Each structure stands twice: as structure tokens, then as C-alpha cells.
Amino acid sequence: MEGKILIADDDEQSLGSLSRILAGYDVFCASDGNTALEMAGSENPDLVLLDVDMPGMNGLEVLKKLAAMRRRPLVIMITGDGSSETVSKAMAQGVFSYMIKPLEREDVLDQVRRALALRAAGGRD
């Protein structure tokens, strides 16, 4: 499977679980917002799975900075916070989709496949 995916989540269990689910892809992980932004700049991922609540810089702040990148990755927000305010903020910033924890394996794979297919077709660069 093709596609570079950055997983950014401060929860080690979530990172491990998502890494296993996406084992067929080129996956790299960050456990805080600052590291996620640095890795996004150096690795140029096609897709970022981005947790909202992280130390240093939260996911919504990282999302704003990703939008300014020359080659903007698609973003799937992941969080335990399904409040309409948080979802609205993320959607207004152009996320590909928004997933509420706990995440189901097939839902994650479906969203990732859809996002990478859009990227391969030249969408949202």
C-alpha cells in the first residue's frame, strides 16, 4: 500500500493501535503537537491522523500550521471529544474527516483508503 502517514497522538496505546492497523503503509508517529509539526515538515506525509488534545501544541493549532505548508497533507482528526464546537472548528479548517475514539479498525482503514485515493487523484494539494 502506498502513502506516507503521520500519526500524532499523545496516548501511547492509541499510537500503537493505529500503527498496527496501518502497518502496510509508511507510518511514522509523534506524541505531541510540536514533534508532529516538525515531522510533517521533514517527512511530507500524504495524510496525518491528528489527535485534538496533545501537549505542547494541540491538534487544532497543528492543523492551522499544516494548512500553511507548501504541500498540505490531508488530515483526519481523531479525538475522544465529539463536541460540536470542536468538530466545527476542525471542519472549518478543512479536515478530510473527523473520527471519535474509540476507533474501529475497519473505519480507520476506510477513511485512510478514501483520503489516499483522493490524494493520488490530485485532490486537496
Image (cartoon, helix red, strand yellow):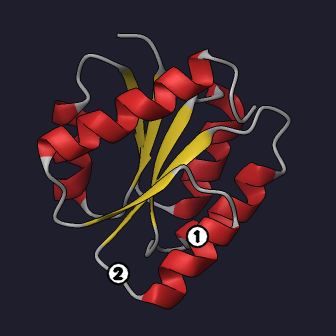
The residue shown at (26%, 43%) is: 108
The residue shown at (64%, 50%) is: 37
Read off the residue under disc 2.
82
Viewer-proximal residue among 76 and 17: 76
In the rendering, at what x and y percent does residue 19 appear? 24, 36
In the rendering, at what x and y percent does residue 115 appear? 48, 34
| Image mark for residue 101 | none
Whether tag 2 and tag 1 are in contact, CB under 8 A, the answer is: no
Label 2: state its secondary structure.
loop
Taking the image as shown, residue 64 lies to the left or right of residue 34, namely right
Label 1: state its secondary structure.
helix
Residue 123 falls in image quadrant: top right
Instruction: Check the picture and name the quadrant holding the N terminus.
Output: top left
- Compared to 47, does 95 lie above or below? below
Taking the image as shown, residue 19 lies to the left or right of residue 29, namely left
**Residue 81 seen in the figure:** yes
Read off the residue under disc 1.
90
Taking the image as shown, residue 43 lies to the left or right of residue 86, namely right
Of marks 2 and 1, which one's residue comes earlier in the chain? 2
Viewer-proximal residue among 63 and 104: 104
- Compared to 84, does 75 lie above or below? above
Task: Categorize mark 1 by other alpha carbons within 10 Å: few (<14), some (14-19), many (20+).
Answer: many
In the rendering, at what x and y percent does residue 12 appear? 23, 56
Residue type, mark 1 in image: Ala
Residue type, mark 2 in image: Gly
- Compared to 40, does 22 lie above or below? above
**Residue 57 seen in the figure:** no
Residue 106 falls in image quadrant: top left
In the rendering, at what x and y percent does residue 117 appear? 49, 22
